[in-house]
């Protein structure tokens, strides 16, 4: 079978690095995808995202900078100290190997590079680190100088081509459906088939029809359905459909999509990462208390001790690689389930919410204290829903989610629509609205904050142009502990140049840029137009949050899950 060469792919990467407009990147990709064999599209798609596999599978090779120095020294027969020195000068291992590798030709294919990296990823057990080193060193030796540059960056998880999944999806629409306008259909399909490579291959083989053939399956998470927000309780009535009202408690924990396939249990986060290993206790409860053999269930994990819900921050302490067994006792968890998306071979996505909820109740053991149904109230009277909201607040919860009970109340993966409306304490009390923003830069601290960051430059995601646009400079609200933990995490995502998809005003140029990865929650006094920021920029002025204060970090969210430009606009107009 024909397969695409890795050299052409490396050349594509080099060209993409020079482009900054998403339109030219899309065109370049379209052209490339049209030329390569259909069976290679998936590998190219994963690599472009900086991954080896779909994002819900593990992509971490477990190789850090220190090990990389050893690998590079071995591959090119150089002294480790020398490699380290060049690395310190260049600050990027890709540039180091490009310099050390003198090879002009190779016969590597995309598939071979993929398979080797995948194999390294899967190598585990005794002596695995040595085996990994050897395999990667061999691959670097057998590649050309340009290929080696992108291979090592991919292996270390720092490819950073600045190509977002949105741009790849658009290029699929252009290359395989002949009309870029089909991008919405392709994007909707991506919400269900979150494996970008599989989707690309299907489109290449079947044209637009290839986007329509996906349904939910076990082991491949769908994007989570999200809720709209309203400012006044009475707006809910205007927006919600159905002759009956239904409201559920809004639990503030970690969103989880549970996939149960007989004895195999997988837990996926809202960012679609596999978080199964974080919750061995939950896996046991699911085996015991979810009665269906094969099912996908949506819910919220909460830290829960002695009959009390613990804070979201406490729960996040369990996001760790080590000591999980210890933390399992320290921070016990339960899951509140609120939806069912798949049952014994059949998708439930298109069934209306009342039917799904009924089925959900039948699928779990409702006597269990560990897997519990989300508390709910149905009524025709809005006053009773308001009472239910009060009750939720008295119980210490964030608020409620009102859910449509109409015929059309399907489960919409990846959509923030009016089928679910959140109603929170903050809105009711006229309290400050919170925003989720991604850290893209920092300014050096002065005085007491010398040696730390003084303020963080934060952005929101604009899904119209696939860019991160700055919205706020946050310097208040951090405790000493925050400075330390955030500072440590930021060090790991520091980048030398401005990330390509970031729109920043010259005036706001930070001292350090970061890969847009860390999401934080902030509150602020009001939204204004300012020449300093670039969010939804109009006539040189962007939307900006005045008097922002840091609240906490949101490890459960990815950069694409920040408050959107659209939401900010609608809040400004209220
Ligand atoms: P916020 O930032 O306001 O806490 P969010 O950004 O985490 O919310 P939203 O889409 O705004 O996410 O609100 C929906 C979230 O509420 C879901 O992602 C889910 O994690 C959580 N949730 C808690 N209880 C429920 C429930 N009963 N039904 C649906 N979602 C629920």
Image (spheres, helix red, strand yellow):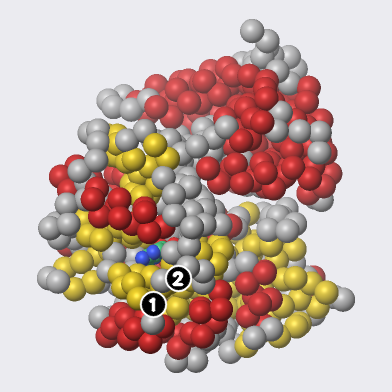
Q: Mark 2: give few (<14), some (14-19) or many (20+) Cα within 10 Å.
A: few
Q: Position of residue 477 (x, y in %)?
A: 47, 83
Q: Are marks 2 and 1 in contact (CB under 8 Å)?
A: yes
Q: Examine the rendering and report whether any part of residue 436 can be seen.
A: no
Question: Where does the C terminus fall, quadrant-wise?
Answer: bottom right
In the image, residue 107 sits, relative to residue 558, either above or below, namely above
- Under circle 1, the secondary element is loop
| Residue 252 appears left or right of 574 | left
Residue sitting at 56 percent across and 74 percent down?
A: 239
Residue under the point 33% across and 57% down: 357
Residue that label 1 marks: 380
Q: Quadrant of residue 318?
A: bottom left
Q: Secondary structure at mark 2?
A: loop
- Residue 361, which numbered label? none
Specify whether 187 is left or right of 400. Answer: right
Residue identifier under label 2: 243
């Amino acid at each position: 079978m024909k397969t695409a060469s890795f050299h052409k792919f490396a050349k594509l990467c080099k060209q993409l690095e020079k482009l900054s407009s998403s339109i030219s990147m899309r065109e370049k990709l379209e052209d490339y995808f049209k030329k390569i064999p259909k069976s290679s599209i998936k590998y190219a798609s994963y690599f472009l995202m900086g991954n080896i596999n779909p994002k819900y599978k593990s992509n971490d090779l477990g190789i850090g900078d220190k090990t990389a120095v050893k690998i590079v020294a071995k591959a090119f027969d150089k002294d480790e100290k020398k490699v380290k020195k060049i690395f310190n000068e260049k600050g990027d291992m890709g540039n180091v190997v490009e310099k050390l590798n003198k090879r002009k030709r190779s016969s590597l294919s995309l598939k071979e590079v993929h398979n080797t990296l995948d194999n390294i990823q899967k190598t585990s057990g005794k002596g695995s680190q040595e085996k990994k080193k050897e395999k990667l060193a061999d691959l670097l030796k057998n590649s050309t100088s340009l290929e080696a540059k992108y291979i090592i960056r991919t292996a270390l998880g720092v490819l950073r081509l600045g190509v977002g999944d949105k741009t790849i999806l658009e290029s699929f629409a252009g290359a395989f459906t002949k009309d870029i306008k089909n991008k919405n259909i392709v994007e909707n399909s991506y919400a269900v088939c979150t494996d970008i490579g599989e989707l690309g291959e299907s489109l290449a083989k079947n044209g637009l029809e290839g986007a329509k053939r996906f349904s939910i399956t076990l082991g491949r998470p769908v994007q989570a359905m999200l809720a709209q927000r309203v400012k006044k309780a009475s707006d809910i009535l205007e927006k919600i459909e159905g002759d009956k009202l239904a409201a559920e408690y809004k639990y503030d924990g970690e969103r989880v999509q549970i996939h149960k396939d007989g004895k195999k249990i997988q837990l996926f986060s809202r960012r679609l990462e596999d978080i199964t290993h974080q919750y061995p206790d939950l896996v046991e409860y699911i085996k015991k208390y979810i009665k269906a053999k094969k099912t996908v269930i949506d819910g919220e994990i909460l830290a829960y001790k002695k009959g009390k819900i613990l804070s979201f921050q406490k729960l996040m302490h369990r996001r760790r690689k080590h000591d999980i067994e210890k933390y399992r006792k320290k921070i016990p968890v339960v899951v509140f389930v609120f939806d069912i998306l798949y049952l014994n071979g059949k998708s439930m996505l298109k069934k209306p919410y009342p039917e799904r909820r009924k089925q959900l109740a039948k699928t779990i053991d409702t006597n269990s204290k560990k897997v519990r149904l989300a508390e709910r109230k149905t009524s025709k009277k809005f006053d009773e829903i308001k009472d239910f909201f009060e009750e939720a607040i008295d119980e210490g919860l964030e608020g409620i989610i009102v859910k449509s009970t109409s015929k059309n109340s399907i489960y919409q993966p990846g959509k923030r629509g009016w089928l679910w409306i959140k109603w929170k304490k903050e809105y009711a009390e006229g309290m400050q609205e919170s925003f989720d923003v991604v850290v893209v830069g920092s300014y050096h601290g002065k005085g007491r904050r010398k040696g730390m960051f003084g303020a963080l430059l934060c952005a929101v995601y604009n899904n119209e142009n696939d860019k991160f646009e700055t919205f706020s400079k946050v310097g208040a609200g951090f405790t000493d502990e925050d400075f330390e933990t955030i500072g440590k995490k930021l060090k790991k995502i520091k980048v030398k140049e401005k990330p390509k998809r970031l729109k920043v005003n010259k005036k706001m140029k930070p001292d350090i840029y970061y890969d847009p990865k860390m999401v934080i929650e902030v509150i602020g006094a009001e939204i204004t137009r300012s020449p300093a920021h670039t969010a939804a920029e109009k006539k040189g002025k962007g939307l900006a949050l005045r008097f922002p204060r840091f609240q906490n970090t949101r490890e459960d969210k990815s950069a694409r899950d920040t408050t959107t430009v659209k939401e900010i606009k609608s809040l400004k107009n209220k």
